[in-house]
Amino acid sequence: MSAMEGHAAPYVEAQQGQAGELPAAGIAALDRSRAKALEALGERGLPSQRDEDWKYTSIKPITRSRFSPAAPGTDCPEDFVAAAAIENLDAWQLVFADGFYLPPRSKTNGLPEGVRVAGLADALTQNPQPIADRLGSAMGEIPHGFAAMNSAFVGDGALVEIAPGVQLEKPIELLFVSGCSGEGFLSLPRNLVILGEGSQASVIERHLSFSQERSLSNSLTEIILEKAAALDFCCVQDQAERTFHVGGLFARLAQSAKLKATTVTVGRAWVRNDARVNLDAERALVSLDGAYLAFGRSHVDNHTHISHNAPECTSRECYKGVLGDRGHAVFHGRIVVQPGAQQTDSEQSNQNLLLSANAEIDTKPQLEIYADDVKCAHGATVGQLDEAALFYLVSRGVDRETARRMLTQAFAAEVLEGVEPPALQTYLASRVSGQLSSAAAQVSAP
């Protein structure tokens, strides 16, 4: 048994002990998918740096400890949820403590007809078959051990289902608070977002830490967009330094469907994000964007994979990172144009700003093209603050610290300017500004 397989063993045993108590246990389709995922976890174990997709991300900080799966019944104090609210954001809200839905803390009144939002466990208990048939369909093949772990334990999280033709006028916020159970617990939220033909919605997925307690969050979101559906999705990761967060976003787009997905990482946690999008029919469009900060000794790894599986599809991808102190970031973006996916239009960009000599970025934009009538471009940049622009501001009376902050914020603004609604954009700009303000005073030129 390899070390990584050995590290997975406690989680395999925990799942085997809980299997009969998981929601909808006994439903054949769900039992099979859980068993398949458990087998994959046992055989493959957790990923290691021998795996190409994990070459620059060591999970040793996670495997030094064992995390116990959190149990239902954990609460998150009302005052914490109130304090975490985004100012001026008018949204329906589902609140989760260590991955488990908290109806008393949530706000779902006034949902229009044709919109269903619920805890996944409740939905599986009431009418499991339709959900069991969709779970895993956007992910496809399990990419690594953490995704297998989530799929083996799949139990609670968020279900968002929008009927054909329904257009929501305000967003749905999914607020996940980790660390509510105390030190050393594992949360495993699983989210399923389904938009019917011609529907339109906005979903905000936000991850916060309740305290400074050490915890592991293994979160996976699947998105299914039917013909001509449009989804604006934003994932915000703002967790504490002793939090480990492994996130997965898996999406499938039908004909003329549109997905705008933005991931913003502004906390101090150890973070790994996977985003995999399949454009399965003509004229599907995805915009995949990200902004990430890595200060102190934080680690942020973004792995993206967009697959053009049909003709006339469009993808736009822009990830921007600001790193300081001993922060380390990884970007691996892969775009695959399959045979027959003619008239593909794809652009990919990763840009990074290093504010200290000890900050480090490993970046690898990648194109694989198996069609001949395409328009594709990709690139990456790694640099420092523009000294000419810095001198210009200082020469006009702006102190050097403020000038650095202004230039750094302007660098990140391209991603944040596309975030909707305005209240969320203002909140994110404030969080980025706060992080950069504290870092700017300590910056030493590389």
Image: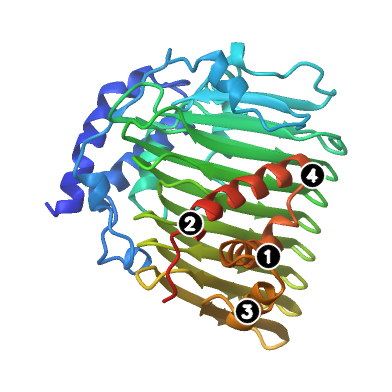
- Residue plotted at (71% across, 84% down): 374
**Element on which disc 2 rests:** helix
Quadrant of res 193: top right
Q: Give the left or right position of residue 219, taking residue 120 as reference.
A: left
Percent x, y of residue 309 = 65, 68
Given this view, does label 4 or label 2 mark the residue nearer the observer?
2
Q: Which mark is residue 422?
A: 4
Q: Which mark is residue 410?
A: 1
Q: Amino acid at mark 3?
A: Phe
- Residue plotted at (84% across, 35% down): 168
Most distant residue in the bottom direction: 372
Given this view, does label 1 or label 3 mark the residue nearer the observer?
3
> Which image quadrant: the C terminus?
bottom left
Q: Are marks 4 and 1 in contact (CB under 8 Å)?
A: no
Q: Amino acid at mark 1?
A: Ala
Q: Amino acid at mark 2?
A: Ala
The residue indicated by pointer 3 is 391
Q: Give the left or right position of residue 150, taking residue 59 as reference.
A: right
The earlier-in-sequence mark between 4 and 1 is 1
**Element on which disc 1 rests:** helix
The relative height of residue 321 versus residue 121 in the rendered view (above or below) is below
Label 4 crowd (10 A; few <14 / some 14-19 / many >=20): few
**Element on which disc 4 rests:** helix
